[in-house]
Image (spheres, rainbow, N blue to C red):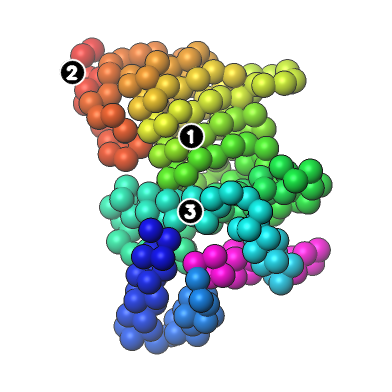
Amino acid sequence: MRHQIWQQLRLEAEDLIRSEPLLASHVYSCILNHSCLGSALSFIVANKLTDGVVSAFTFRELFDQAFVNCDNMLTHVSCDIKAVIDRDPAIDKYLTVLLNLKGFQAIQVHRLAHCLWQQKRRDLARFIQSRNSEVFGIDIHPACKIGKGVMFDHATGIVIGETAVIEDNVSILQGVTLGGTGNECGDRHPKIREGVMIGAGAKVLGNIEVGNGAKIGAGSVVLHAVPAHTTVVGVPAKIVGRTNCPCPAESMDQSFAEAQSEA
């Protein structure tokens, strides 16, 4: 899939140059001057992260090392791109995801920080976490584990704590917090299982599990475990029905019609 996505990205880049010459230099430097997806991604994100402390060149080197040292990182990148194309009706080009979507870009920066965290380079990982927050408006602790095929839609204001786990094929909208309930130590953050969708502004707090295929309504405050394939809504959140599909993250259905029908 990675190579197919890269070929499609190059085709879309060539089309964009023909339709919008003002962006030709940008598209050449970000896409067409590169030989693979990893090279293009590291160039794009490094130039956004660079500051007076770490250069874009150094960030690129860190990404290149991570692609080698951290298992399946580039495969996960490809799955994240595909997730956006499949789930977001406003996005119809791979190129848009790679060049412009900060939710996608912030996840990839976190993957770098997490790789460094696992290598015990924790001060550098925290520095990258800080740059991720400053540049993209998303704060993810570098120890947090994130699977593949994850989409942060709009993404502004997402906060994810140290011991949180996000499994494969999860969709999270803007303003979501996966946090603790106080200043407790140890394992204290939510575990988000496969296929979950979390609506805008929801807060999931404590070392609780949100089961496979569950759906959390916008603005809800979740303080207790959520069973698989259920919908929870409210403050505090309560179960209001079962989900209609096995993977709400993919359908992105936020109407909660199944909950209303069972109420």
Q: Does the segment drawn in magenta span residue 6?
A: no
Residue 132 visible in the displayed image: no
Q: Amino acid at mark 3?
A: Thr
Indicate which disc residue 261 carries. Answer: 2
Q: Amino acid at mark 2?
A: Ser
Q: Earlier in the sequence, mark 2 or mark 3?
A: 3
Residue 167 falls left or right of residue 181:
left
How packed mark 1 is, by other alpha carbons closer than 10 Å (few <14, some 14-19, many 20 or more), is some
Q: Which residue is labeled 3 in the image?
A: 75
Predominant SS of the magenta segment: helix
The local secondary structure at tag 1 comes to loop
Indicate which disc residue 167 carries. Answer: 1
Comparing 201 with 153, the one in front is 153
Can you tell which quarter of the image residue 199 is in? top left
- Region rendered in magenta: 37-55
- The residue at 68%/60% (across/down) is 65
Q: Position of residue 38 (x, y in %)?
A: 54, 65
Marks 2 and 3, Cα distance to the nearest angstrom?
40 Å
Q: Position of residue 226 (x, y in %)?
A: 43, 17
